[in-house]
Image: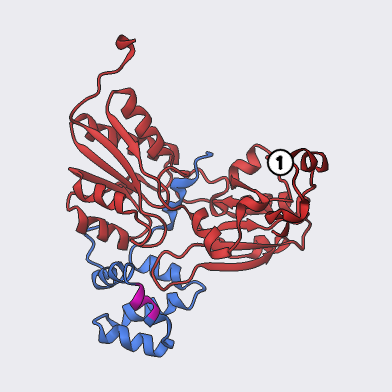
Chain colours: A blue, B red
Amino acid sequence: MADDPTHRDLKDFLTKLATDPERQAEFAGLTPEELRQRLIDEGLSEEDADLLVNAQSGGTGQRDLNRSIGGDLDLWNVHASSI
Amino acid sequence: MASLQKKIHTAGSLVVVGTGIKLVGQVTLEAQAFIRQAEKVVYLVSNEAIAYWIATLNPSAESLHHYYADGKLRIQTYQEIVQHILTLVRQGVQLCAVFYGHPGVLVAPAHEAIRQARLEGYRASMLAGVSAEDCLFADLGFEPAYRGWQSFEATNLLLYKRQIDSSLHLILWQIGAIGIQYRRGELSKGVQALTARLVDVYGPDHVAVLYEASQYPTVPPRIEYVRLADLPGAEITRASTLYVPPQVQPTLDQAMLEYLEIDPDDLVWKRN
């Protein structure tokens, strides 16, 4: 998984954003359109910007983001230890 | 006494750490240091962003994901993961195994690998991490200890006919994997069985919460209110946890209050 170059910019962006509460707060204050433009200005592709903006809107957005960057929710099965 | 003590190998070792649920931010500093300094890292995480981050910390990082396969029993996958870990430790590797969430909560291979490594005389330990339940307490905003809470893996609840106390908070893990032994499987039967069980205790109109912790910064958790009777029609995923709030007030033991000389008006948790 780690060598998969798909959406590498987005992965790098997210891992840095994760430990930057100031930027997180800044992004939270933007409208979806402003955020999308800001993400593009910071170097993300339009596709990646849309993924993150949609994820922030709730609903299935997080799942779409997860799938797009290689998330495998079947891995949650690792937790199901009863059977 | 000394003859009973196992020889501690000086070479191979195992430390198991967790990444938490939310990307990077829930990894403890201690876990991060172990990942960085390990001779070798293996991991099983839920998305590629965290895999990418682990690889930036330690280029030796290797995914265990390939042990999963359609039509393969999960227990077989677990055994293979344990054997992979132990093979490395036996080779003298100082290994760090990384799992998402809390590595000791509903992660059977992590415990088994540590148990077997210790049996063979290797140093093996686990570091605590952040579980989905920890995130739930924060996101749903209740103090579990005031009322007390029950926490079951959903299949376990059904298989063992666990007793539900409707005066407590109830947390059900893995409602998106009830009865599923393989990587993929039919979900609806399990959800219907769970719904029947819960409706029997709480009635159809009691409102629960479908919860999925946030996995990414700035992305909100999924918090969706649902009547218990409507659960089969709700969108349930592998990441879904069900929270059922208390329905009835617990009964105070007046004799114990008097014995402990507690004024019931002073009880902090009576309001929760």
Q: How many marks?
A: 1
Residue at image point 58% right, 64% down: B140
Chain letter for mark 1: B
B230 left or right, relative to B30: right
Report if residue B58 is visible in the image: yes
Indicate yes or no whether the magenta region holds residue A23.
yes
Q: Which residue is mark 1?
A: B163
Report if residue B73 is visible in the image: no
Residue at image point 43% right, 78% down: A54
Q: Where does residue A64 sit, x and y in percent of width and height?
A: 42, 70
B28 or B243: nearer the eye? B28
Q: Amino acid at mark 1?
A: Gln
Residue at image point 43% right, 57% down: A73
B6 or B252: nearer the eye? B252
A66 left or right, relative to B167: left
Task: Give the residues drawn in magenta, as a range.
Answer: A21-25
Q: Where does residue B89 sit, x and y in percent of width and height?
A: 23, 33
Q: Residues within 10 Å of mark 1 (few under 14, many from 20)?
A: few
Would you place residue B128 above or below residue A6 in this image? above
B93 left or right, relative to B77: left
Occupied quadrant, residue A22: bottom left
Occupied quadrant, residue A26: bottom left
Residue at image point 43% right, 45% down: B71
Instruction: Indicate the quadrant containing the C terminus of chain B: top left, top right, bottom left or bottom right.
Output: bottom right
Q: Where does residue A68 sit, x and y in percent of width and height?
A: 35, 69
Q: Main secondary structure of the magenta part?
A: helix
Indicate yes or no whether the magenta region holds residue B15.
no
Would you place residue B62 above or below residue B203 in this image? above
B63 left or right, relative to B160: left
B187 or A3: nearer the eye? A3
